[in-house]
Amino acid sequence: MAEARAKYRTEITQMMFVSGETGDPTPETTTMIEGIVQQQVMEMLKRATELAARRGVRTISTDDLIFLIRHDKAKVSRLRTFLSWKDVRKSAKDSDEKGGGGADAGGVEDFDLAANDPTLGTGPNVNTRTSKNKKAKVGLPWDVSSFYTEQVPEREDEEDEEEEEMNAATLQRLKQADERTKGMNAEEYLHFSECRQASFTFRKGKRFREWAGFGVVTDSKPNDDIVDILGFLTYEIVTLLTEEALKVKATEDALKRESGGDEEKRGRKRRREPGLFDPPEEARTPVSAKHIQEAFRRLQRPDLKANYMKHIPKGTWQRPLKLI
Amino acid sequence: MSQDAPTSTVDGDVGGGPEDLLKSRWAETEANIAKLFGTDGQTRRTSQKPTTASEAAATTTTSAPDNAKTPAPPKRSARHIDDDYGDDDDEDEEDSPKESPLRKKAKIALPNGIHPLAARSPLPAGRALPRAAPTSTPSEPAKSSEDVRKQLEEDKRTAEEAATKSFQSMYYTFEHDKDAMVEQQKLDELDREVENELSGGATDAPNAQQGAGAGPAAASTQGTLGSADLGASSLTLKHLIARIDMKRDMVRASDNQLRTLISEVRKGRSKWASEDKVGQEELYEAAEKVLMELKAQTDYAQPFLQRVSKREAPDYFNVIKHPMDIGTMLKKLKQLGYRSKRDFVDDLNLIWANCLKYNQDPQHPLRKKALYMRKETDKLTPLIPDILVRDRAEVEAEERRLHSIDADESDEDDAPIMASRGRKAPKKGGSKGGPTSTKRAPTVAVEEAGSATPAPDMKPPLPLSATNLRTETLRAESEVQDASSAGFSTPPPGNATPLGVNGVNGSGAPGSQADVTEVDGLGNSVVGSTPEDEDEEDTEFKTWKQVTKRDRAQAAADRHRLFRGEQLKNLNPEEPALIRTKAMMRRWTRQQMAASGKPSGQAEAGESAEEPEQPAQGESLAEGIEKDQDSTLPDYYSSLSAIPELDERFRWTTDSEGAVVPQTEEWMRMYPKEQFKSADGALNRKIEDNMRQMQDTRKICAKIGVVKQMQIQAQTYQNQFTKYEVQPFIEQDVGAVVVSEDGPLMAPWVSRAALQRSVGKIFYHAGFEDFQPSALEMITDLAGEYFGKLVDAFKSFREQPKAEPETSRYSYEEQVLHSLHEHGLDLEALETYVKDDVERLSTKLGVVHDRMRSHLADLLRPALGDHAGADGVGAFNDGSEQFVGGDFAEDLDEDFFGFRELGLAEELGLENLSVPLHLLQNRMHSAYQAAHQGPASTTGLVFPQPDPYEPITIDNVGAQVGLVQDFFREKLHANHEDALVEDEDLPQKQRFPKPRLPPTGKISSPRKRPIREQQQAAKKKRKMEESGKAGGVEVAPIGKLKLEASVGKGVNGVQEPEKKREKGGEEMEVDREVNGGGGEVNGGAGGGTMISPESLAPN
């Protein structure tokens, strides 16, 4: 069963690697992650379909998907960045096809990478882009601009506070990645950057559709944007899970060290302080399924907000799955 | 005497029977004292002295030794002689309510010379002759016996008080009241029965009749006679009180004193009093009280109230030879069938013994009751003074005899005398009371005496050896009893020596001593275990039931009376109204104070401190006395009393003319304004700013929409665009509301509307310009419920049980935070809302607003950006200046596009309300492209408007070029010599459509005709086609012109003129068609003015 389901083992491993798990996770771990991600994706699709149905539409739109994660503002803004870059890429491609600008070709190639990898956010060629390729902000239906009947183009000088925040979050991630890659040699870095491109959806559209239950959960033909958003979100989920699981594992390790008794304690003792001649991190044991499980549990912990109508009797009510 | 009894019922009117009289009077005086002097034992005890002293001339004091020393006893006897004349003094003395019954009895015992302890030692022989040997009286033993009684009584009282106090702190339901009432009714019935029997059978005894005289009157004829007497006596007293009240300042006595005095005056004489029976009153008073007490234990006494009938227990009389019951005892008592304490006590014990004997089964419920009752009996019997009823004559004779005898011998002689008395006494009783009852008592005694051991059938082996001080003293009493009353079983010589008396007592005294010792035995063994098995009720509840029984029964009966009919569903209109009295209210407050945990002394002190003030507040003496009615019931029994004084302003008062004085007006006030508007806070202000901002932006939006629409549409109409009306948000306050007191205005619907408005505000703030009412309702409901729960939580946190009495368990901050947390909120969430949804929204709105503004500006003044002049004049450099300065806007002073109304005029900065060119690009380029192609001046000069062409009239036609003069003249002629009208100035319908030049520059289509002509032409064409077909004429589809021309000249030529004549317009049309084509060409080539087709029409 697990084997039959495991379609994204390499991708998940790569994503985990980028997220900080240096070891080689076991198939159980990746399978579990895959299961969680699949569950999340299906839930998202289901809810988005419901939202769309409420609007009287059968096909889900990007807004429906974004609406589901609207409370995680950082994520929303990252997603918007991702989408706007996607737009840029598209228009750039178009213009490239038309104009056939050879000078831009190299840039576009780079650009593909960057756009596909949301964590990179603003790519290296931000300054090189032409005004035509300027990324357009992805508007959301609950944005202020939609309060009004007329849509007016944005002006250049406006910078959202939110955008700044989002940039801050993105920068934080970039910084982390930078820290990690600092000590890498060219080979390692190549591996790392390859791993960064891992995606559930990129160039695996069909596989993903089957996997996510398109046609089952939602009977709509998904458009590209939705698949891309899902790809982005799945990446986020894996990252979050891995980070949380690493935290869990760190706590566990700390506890083990405290209490002693572990047989690898002696071996670890030396390495407690990261030293100059430490063996590479790969020597660490990778996160296991139980860590993932615990991380998932932690992430599922209900918000305080969920209390707000608790006085209303709900019968045998099960807390809905929390989207992470 | 008979007058006295009703008098006493004045205050005891609540009680139905004689026992009620007694008890209520007692309780009442007790309460009175308590009120006057404070409740704690010390003060009360001391306070009794002055009262007794003041009330009576006799200097009798409470303590035994004093009594013994004072000359009171002789006086006492003297007074008894005086009793014929109804002297009030000794009545007061005897009933002195200030004293505990025990003491009373002790005192009572003294004058009669049969001090209970007298027989204990040889020394107090002088007791019998108090006058002879007052000094020799040993105070010590007397005291101790006195103390025991006191102790007992005090215990009982304190227990009762404690119980009463506990009633205040505990709520007892009324459900047992009915039982109490029923039981009480039974008791009353029993009394009545006894009385009836007595009055029927014992008429011959004058004493009995006398004694019963007051009793039946109060019991059986309670309704009429009692109330009549009562009314009369109370009336007299009321007069007295009124009198005193009137001359209050002349009376030199404090209120308290007066009150005491009056209550004393009202005391009645006992019904047992008899002038020629020494000691009868005292004994019977006590005995009756004991009997009543026992009877009042209704839970237990019930089975013993009446004689066992044969029907109930067929074999009863086989087992029990001497049946006895409380009813019989009462009867006997009323018939004066008891001669001594022992008689009485024996009878009592006989009841229990009978029961125990008959019901051998240890599990039998009646046994428990009997045991309980026996315990009670043993508790109560010490209260009965040990008195032997004797004839006065005998006593006096004895006294006389003793006078003659030497004091030394007195102790020797005393006993025989007593014995002789004792022997004589039964005879007396027998002669007076009914023969049966007198007989019975002796027989019992004999039987017991005969068995030598105390009634084996009724008592377990007695632990005689385990006597303590109490039993010792009690034994002393019983010794006396033995020696005196039951003396016939022992020979007089035995009595002669005190030792002999003791000896006799030890062996042959069955009655009271056995009881007393048994008390202890039982108290330790049997009784100790009984409460659990015999009654599941807790002791507190039991005490409650017992203590308050009578009052509850009374209350229940009162309540019962209020209703009538089946099911008691209807109110009884006959009953007097329930009226709240001040006394009840005071009582209620007192109880409240007592119950509120204040130390009683303090409460009393406060009470007594208040006391002197109260009369000064206009409280009359009568009211003061009214309060004397005190009952053991807690305040919630008299719900009426808990109604506080009506506020002055709510009273219904009338002026002298009977009109109602509207006093409420001055208390009315307007409900403060702004209570139903959102408070003016920083957040609220921000939200409102945001909303205003949104409105402004929306306004701009509307303008943008208008401009965009104008650019798209070829034609715009004034009413095409609905103006965006900005209406400021105004929160309406509630109208003027008049309220009479502080506090929130309780109007749920108004509050809901206010909440709804707030919700709507939030909606708008969240970006919804309008919303469905159902959504608004829904959210309002949810919000209302949520806030309700929030407040609930807050309340529960606020009212948490306090750790310490004063400080709350949670601080205010904690209360708020906890309740927020309970409902899924925390400060962070609130702060996030304020920061993100209000403050950040404000900046975003500002940004969008600016964006909109600039966009609108861009739309309106595209060229304004770089090369416009300071005043924006450069914007017209595109050659629209003639247009801008054109006549049509300024001269007509018309708001063409509704700009003025839409408010665009200000935005455009155009004073003259002309239309800037770029707004009209569409039209300009189509209609006047050719005309305005050339002049592209960059100077920014505004050219003056050229003069309009003069219309051609008959006068100035000569000024025209000669070639066209004829033409014009014809035209003028056709126009009836009026000035010719320019084509442009024609009415819309006659005007030719604007010539449109396609981008190719070629005129491809003929000029269109005016709308009306087109229609007519179409009609005509159809007609002609039909006629053409009919005529078989080949019609070449070249064009209209040719066709019509050929038609006109051809086949239908004959018809044509007719048509012309008929419809001249139509004919003209054809011609104009011809000329029109040329005109168009001309127009296209010549430009500028065009000549109207009419002028070209042939005449």
Image (spheres, coloured by chain):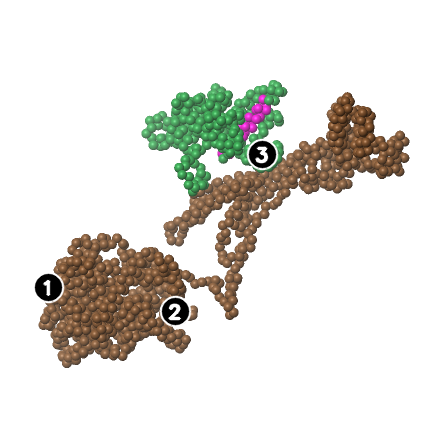
Chain colours: A green, B brown
**Residue pushed farthest front?**
B1030
Relative to B278, is B41 on the left or the right? Answer: right
Vertical placement of A111 versus B514: above or below?
Answer: above
Vertical placement of B614 versus B815: above or below?
Answer: below
Q: Give the residue type that dot 2 points to.
A: Glu
**Residue B811 appears at what percent x and percent y?**
43, 48
Q: Give the residue type that dot 1 points to.
A: Ala
Report which residue position mark 1 lands on.
Answer: B452
The magenta stretch spans which residues? A72-93
Report which residue position mark 3 lands on.
Answer: A159
Which circle, 2 or 3, is nearer the viewer? 2
**Residue A32 included in the magenta stretch of the image:** no
- Tell me the chain of label 2: B
Closer to the camera in the image, A323 or B239: B239
**Residue A314 appears at what percent x and percent y?**
42, 39
Q: Secondary structure at mark 2?
A: helix
- Mark 3 to mark 1 CA distance (whole Å): 119 Å
Vertical placement of B93 versus B1020: above or below?
Answer: below
Report which residue position mark 2 lands on.
Answer: B623
Instruction: Give the number of the disc on residue B162.
Output: none
Write the residue at 22% across / 53% down.
B533
Closer to the camera in the image, A29 or A184: A29
Check if mark 2 and mark 1 are on a common chain.
Answer: yes
Relative to B1016, is B326 on the left or the right? Answer: left
- Mark 2 to mark 3 CA distance (whole Å): 86 Å
Q: Secondary structure at mark 3?
A: loop
Name the quadrant of the N terminus of chain A: top left
User: Could you say which quadrant of the image residue A23 lies in?
Assistant: top left
Vertical placement of A19 versus B212: above or below?
Answer: above
Which circle, 3 or 1, is nearer the viewer? 1
Q: Residues within 10 Å of mark 2 (few under 14, many from 20)?
A: some
Whether residue B111 is visible here, answered yes or no, is: no
